[in-house]
Image: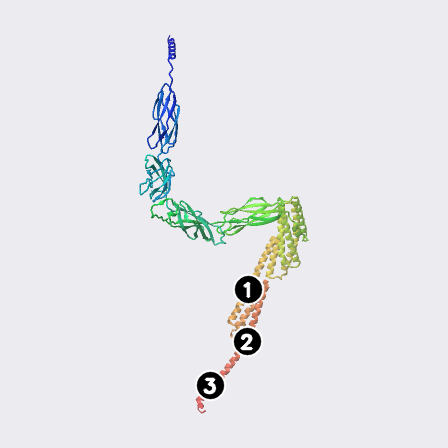
């Protein structure tokens, strides 16, 4: 029942709706607007839109602005209802001072419209560059300059401009001149539309403003006749400082002694010293003085000025004596600034203080220069040994030198870097090279059959040391076939089985070499064996010839040389690796031993016969005993050699004793003779005379002692075998014997003279006495009175 009621109601409603007549909705069919003119300096302009609603219903006005000129703002402030028919919708139009003319487009409830807007711009003031940068202004000074004012609206000219600083800077004050006009006959800024004129600005910077501080102001500009047509412009500047000497930098604070000390006494060079200008204006530079302790330094090149915030490099000449020790040496650099004239700088403004001046403060830069004694290692870069026969040794040296002479090179190491590890050996190398001196690197080369004939072999060694650059020595050598003809020729020159058998050994080794079957060490061993054999043959042959000629003393040294060569042959024979070659060498040794034994035996027989003769002096006996001792050693009889050496020592002691006795006796004779010369002889023209008969007994005693001492000396020297010394003493004795005979004869003559003289003296005295007696008697008798 309930469901049926709902269905009935629904049918009734449907039928009722179909019975009501249709109503038409709102329909916007046309929107019209008139063009308008806007003055930015006046109140907003209102533009009425004529809107046609052809519908039968009302609707709210929905306005959308899709486009407008730059600087023009169009808004719909109202909330109109669009009734059927004609309606009015009001728009508000505003423009900025620099707005452009143009078309405003939009729609009202979807119906498009547009209209033209003409902006009646007032004259607008601006600057040539915005934001306006007035550049650099000097700290603590008032700087003035010109600026360019422009009319930027483009429709009217400017008739005076008022500038108001709306935001200032704490570090400086900004003022403008000749902007408004009206003072001192000035009309201020006068321009046509879009034109320009000049005015002045002035900035007074505080004394404590920081260097490079950025100054900024905000300024509001407007034409004096249009106070509402304002524009805001940012102005900026920067604080700068006058020139002052700033920091310094010794770019290269080292001075290297890099020339040989023995070639120069003074090292010269140039170092760079940097001086800066901490100010912002150019700093004039007249002179630079440099004073140093122990070193000559002077400024050689520098510019005439230093630009602001820039640095210049000063070339400083240095001259240092090579005797200076390493270390740091102080010096002073004193730059002399010239007169600063701001008008000659690139400062763009004008300082308002007509008495402005600035003096650059003097400075002294103290720094240090370090003297460094360099160390240079130089080596011979290449060492060419050349062609070296296989089996033969060759050697070469390279020189390592410290070239400068200031420091030793410690911990020198020489290492093989590349090349074969065989054949070439570094026999000697220094571990230290003294300053200014040289040392040698010794190389020894010995190619064996493993070396490829004709190939050039290279070895590279590095030479290192403390605080020096590594140097390289390259050694070159080439193996060539061994030429055995020289040793063959040497051996073949001797007619001796030893030579014949040794040549056979050399030939056998040559055949093995050609076949490549020879041990590398055997080549040099056999060659040395052959060379030792040649020495043996030469020595034993010479010894035989000398003994045959009876020159046994001369033969002794040759026998010793032959024995030494024989021992060398034995040593190398034992070192031969090839069994056949070693056996052949042992055969050679047996033959050589027989020859050597024969010569030694003959020498021994000669010396023994000399001992048995009993006719030898002490020195001859000692010498023969020693020669026999050497022969016993050569024979391998060490016990007999020791006995003979002991006998020789005993003979030498007897010889020494005899010589000492002879010298002692000769010395005693000299001393007696010297005493006689001082006390008994009178020397006339080099001849000794004996004139005092009272000394005759002493004379005869001394003469007898001289005879005895000289006889003893001569006998001792003759027994010792010092015949030359015995002859010299004998000659001296003979000379002094003759002198003694002459002295003795002179004594006899002197004695006779003395006797004659005494007789004369006695006779003369007797005659005087007789006369005296006669005179005395006459005096007594008085006879003399009668005459």
Q: Most extreme residue toward the left, as rendered? A: 183
State the residue in front, 198 or 259. Answer: 198
Task: Give the total number of marks visible in the rendering.
Answer: 3
The location of residue 399, given as percent across then percent down, is: 54, 50
The quadrant of the picture occupied by the C terminus is bottom left
The location of residue 408, given as percent across then percent down, is: 49, 50
276 relative to 221, above or below: below
610 lies left or right of 690: right
Q: CA distance from mark 1 to mark 2?
A: 34 Å
Residue 75: in sight, yes or no?
A: yes
Which label is found at residue 663?
Answer: 1
Which label is found at residue 400?
Answer: none
638 relative to 704, above or below: above
Counting residues from the N terminus, which is met first, the one under dot 2 or under dot 3?
A: 2
Counting residues from the N terminus, which is met first, the one under dot 1 or under dot 2?
A: 1
* Pointer 1 local density, CA inside 10 Å: few below 14, some 14–19, many at least 20: many
Which label is found at residue 772?
Answer: 3
State the residue in front, 453 or 46. Answer: 46
Counting residues from the N terminus, which is met first, the one under dot 1 or under dot 3?
A: 1
State the residue in front, 778 or 296. Answer: 296
Q: Read off the residue under disc 2.
A: 748
- Indicate the secondary structure of the residue bearing disc 1: helix
């Amino acid at each position: 029942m309930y469901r049926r009621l709902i269905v009935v109601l629904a049918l009734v409603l449907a039928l009722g709706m179909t019975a009501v007549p249709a109503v038409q909705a709102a329909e916007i069919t046309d929107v019209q607007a008139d063009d308008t003119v806007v003055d930015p300096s006046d109140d907003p302009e209102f533009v009425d839109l004529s809107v046609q609603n052809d519908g039968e219903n009302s609707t709210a006005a929905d306005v959308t602005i899709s486009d407008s000129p730059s600087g023009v703002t169009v808004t719909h402030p109202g909330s109109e209802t669009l009734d059927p028919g004609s309606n009015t919708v009001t728009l508000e139009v505003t423009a900025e001072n620099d707005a452009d003319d143009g078309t405003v487009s939009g729609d009202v409830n979807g119906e498009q419209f547009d209209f033209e807007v003409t902006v009646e711009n007032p004259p607008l003031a601006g600057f040539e560059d915005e934001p306006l940068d007035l550049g650099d202004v000097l700290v603590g000074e008032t700087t003035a300059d010109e600026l360019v004012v422009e009319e930027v609206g483009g429709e009217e000219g400017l008739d005076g401009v008022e500038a108001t600083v709306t935001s200032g800077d704490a570090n400086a004050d900004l003022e403008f001149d000749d902007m408004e006009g009206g003072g001192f006959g000035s009309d201020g800024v006068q321009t046509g539309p879009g034109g320009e004129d000049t005015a002045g600005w002035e900035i007074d910077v505080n004394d404590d403003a920081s260097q490079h501080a950025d100054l900024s102001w905000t300024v509001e500009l407007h034409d004096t006749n249009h106070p509402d047509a304002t524009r805001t412009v940012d102005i900026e500047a920067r604080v700068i400082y006058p020139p002052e000497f700033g920091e310094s930098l010794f770019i290269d604070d080292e001075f290297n002694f890099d020339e040989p000390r023995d070639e120069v006494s003074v090292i010269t060079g140039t170092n760079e010293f940097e001086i800066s200008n901490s100010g912002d204006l150019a700093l004039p530079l007249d002179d630079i003085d440099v004073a140093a302790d122990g070193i000559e330094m002077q400024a050689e090149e520098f510019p005439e000025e230093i630009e602001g915030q820039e640095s210049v490099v000063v070339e400083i000449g240095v001259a240092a004596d090579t005797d200076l020790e390493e270390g740091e040496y102080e010096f002073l650099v004193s730059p002399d600034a010239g007169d600063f004239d701001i008008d000659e700088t690139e400062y763009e403004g004008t300082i308002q203080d007509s008495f402005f001046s600035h003096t650059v403060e003097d400075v002294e830069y103290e720094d240090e220069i370090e003297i460094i004694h360099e160390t240079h290692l130089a080596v011979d870069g290449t060492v060419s040994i050349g062609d070296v026969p296989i089996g033969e040794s060759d050697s070469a040296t390279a020189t390592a030198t410290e070239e400068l002479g200031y420091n030793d090179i410690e911990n020198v190491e020489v290492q093989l870097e590349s090349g074969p590890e065989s054949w070439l050996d570094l026999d000697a190398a220094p571990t230290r090279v003294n300053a200014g001196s040289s040392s040698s690197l010794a190389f020894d080369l010995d190619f064996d059959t493993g070396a490829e004939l004709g190939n050039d072999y290279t070895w590279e060694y590095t030479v290192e040391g403390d605080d020096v650059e590594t140097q390289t020595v390259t050694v070159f050598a080439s193996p060539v076939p061994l030429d055995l003809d020289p040793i063959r020729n040497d051996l073949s020159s001797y007619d001796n089985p030893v030579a014949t058998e040794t040549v056979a050994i050399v030939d056998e080794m040559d055949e093995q070499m050609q076949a490549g079957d020879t041990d590398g060490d055997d080549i040099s061993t056999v060659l040395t064996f052959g060379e030792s054999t040649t020495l043996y043959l030469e020595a034993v042959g010479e010894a035989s010839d000398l003994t045959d000629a009876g020159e046994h003393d001369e033969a002794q040294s040759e026998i010793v040389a032959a024995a030494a060569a024989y021992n060398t042959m034995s040593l190398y024979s034992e070192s031969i690796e090839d069994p056949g070659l070693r056996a052949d060498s042992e055969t050679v040794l047996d033959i050589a031993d027989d020859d050597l034994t024969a010569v030694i035996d003959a020498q021994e027989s000669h010396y023994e016969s000399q001992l048995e003769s009993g006719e030898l002096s002490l020195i001859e006996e000692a010498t023969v005993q020693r020669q026999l001792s050497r022969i016993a050693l050569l024979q391998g009889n060490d016990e007999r050699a020791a006995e003979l050496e002991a006998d020789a020592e005993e003979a030498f002691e007897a010889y020494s004793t005899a010589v000492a006795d002879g010298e002692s006796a000769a010395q005693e004779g000299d001393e007696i003779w010297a005493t006689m010369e001082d006390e008994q002889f009178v020397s006339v023209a080099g001849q000794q005379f004996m004139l005092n008969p009272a000394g005759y007994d002493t004379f005869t005693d001394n003469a007898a002692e001289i005879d005895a001492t000289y006889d003893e000396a001569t006998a001792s020297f003759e027994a010792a075998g010092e015949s030359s010394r015995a002859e010299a003493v004998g000659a001296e004795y003979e000379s002094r014997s003759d002198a003694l005979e002459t002295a003795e004869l002179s004594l006899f003559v002197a004695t006779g003279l003395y006797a004659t003289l005494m007789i004369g003296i006695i006779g003369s005295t007797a005659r005087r006495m007789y006369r005296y007696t006669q005179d005395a008697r006459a005096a007594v008798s008085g006879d003399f009175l009668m005459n």
